[in-house]
Amino acid sequence: MVPYRGRLALRIARLALAAACLAGYIRSSGWHLTGVVAVLAAYLVYAVGAMFELGFDSTWRANLGLVIDTAYFGFFVYLAPGGWNGSTAAGWLSALDAGYLFASAALQHGVSRVVLVGLVALLDSLLFTPPEEMSLVWTVVGMASTAVALSLYKRYLDGRISAVLRHNVIIRSQAQGAREAERERMAHDFHDGPLQSFISFQMRLEIIKKLLSRDVDAAGEELRQLQNLGKSQVSELRGFVRSMRPAEEGVTLSASLSRMVEQFQRDTGISSTFTAGDFSDPGEVELSLELLQIVRETLNNIQKHSGASRLALSIDKRDQRIEITAEDNGGGFPFSGSFNLDELELLRLGPVSIKRRVRMLGGDLQLESKPGHGASLQIRIPM
């Protein structure tokens, strides 16, 4: 649909042409109430009425308007083959009428209707124009060709706009799914991490309350253990906040990972190293953000479940793939062996959120667990 201002401009052009055609004919032929004057006046009245119906445009109204404009052009060309007693006004008005007809058809209708209008207008020009005056015919041919080209380009733009709109809908849907998945992950992490620690803290306070009336020394020991629990809660909360922290703008992926590992070492006391091999940032920002989130979740899992004292994290690029490797010397997973992503999903083993993110990126992972001797996780993501 043409914007309101464009439709208004077309209506004004139609009204001006209708008034000019009626005035030109009356000036050349004199004022006599004839059938020709009645037709020209009726078209002028129609043009005025169309101005007031601009806000009620619809498909059938546009089609009816195209039929009326095409019929009027044929009538006007039939009326003015002799130039109205030698006047050149009729020729100029016929050309302007053709220009309006093709502009209106190209802007408001499809290619098929533009071609049909062009054929009808050309036929009218050939039938009613004298053989020695073919300028109007060539004018119609040129305008019709331009209108068809404009209509084809408009169809191409409409296709591009439709594709962009569909793509935007898909992106919004994916973004909504990602937000919901992230909320679910945060709720799960909070339930398994800080919330459990607070519940434990509350239970220990109840124990201390009972011990104070019976055994002060035992209550003091419980208080010391509660103090240690409080320290661990601070560490878990820092890890939880760190997992929600966005990537720093303008910082490379390897630099962000290096800072993340340094912060992890300060918060947890786990000796950590980071190495970046032959690696350059991927072109897509979304990919970098997903990789950062995968590493955050890996570090969070190590902090909460591994009991490790050492961690080694590395990132590299091999064969157009990004490889991230994390190794620790903790207690490992409850299972033993080496498994890829498909095997872990089939057996329902391994970190769920990391598996989901790797699958979404079209990558793969290899998880090796040695209970009591640590674990290693290797993630491969195509660039």
Image (cartoon, rainbow, N blue to C red):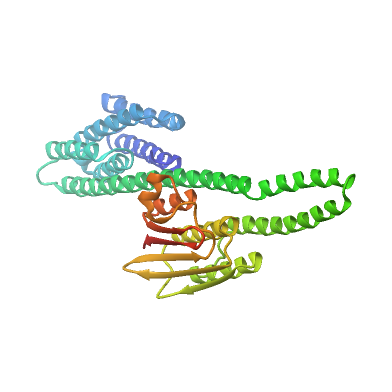
Above or below, comparing residue 42 to residue 321 in the picture:
above
Residue 115 horizontal/vertical position (percent): 20, 40
Q: Is residue 295 left or right of residue 21?
A: right
Q: Front-most of 364 and 88?
A: 364
| Residue 74 drawn at (x, y percent) | 21, 34
Q: Work out whether residue 205 can be spotted.
A: yes
Q: Nearer the viewer, residue 243 or 310?
A: 310
Residue 214 position by quadrant: top right
- The reply to whether residue 41 is visible in this rendering is no
The answer to whether 174 is drawn above or below residue 49 in the figure is below
Find residue 97 and report its image quarter. Answer: top left
Task: Please count the marks in the image.
Answer: 0
Quadrant containing the N terminus is top left
Q: Is residue 326 left or right of residue 21?
A: right
Residue 244 horizontal side relative to residue 284, left or right: right
- Quadrant housing the C terminus: bottom left
Spot the residue most to the right. Answer: 213
List the single residue furthest toward the left: 131
Whole-percent x, y for residue 79 in the image:
21, 34
Q: Give the percent coordinates (x, y) of residue 229.
A: 73, 55
Q: State the residue in front, 58 or 12.
A: 58
Residue visible at 38% across and 32% down in the picture: 47
Which residue is nearer to you in this view: 125 or 301? 301
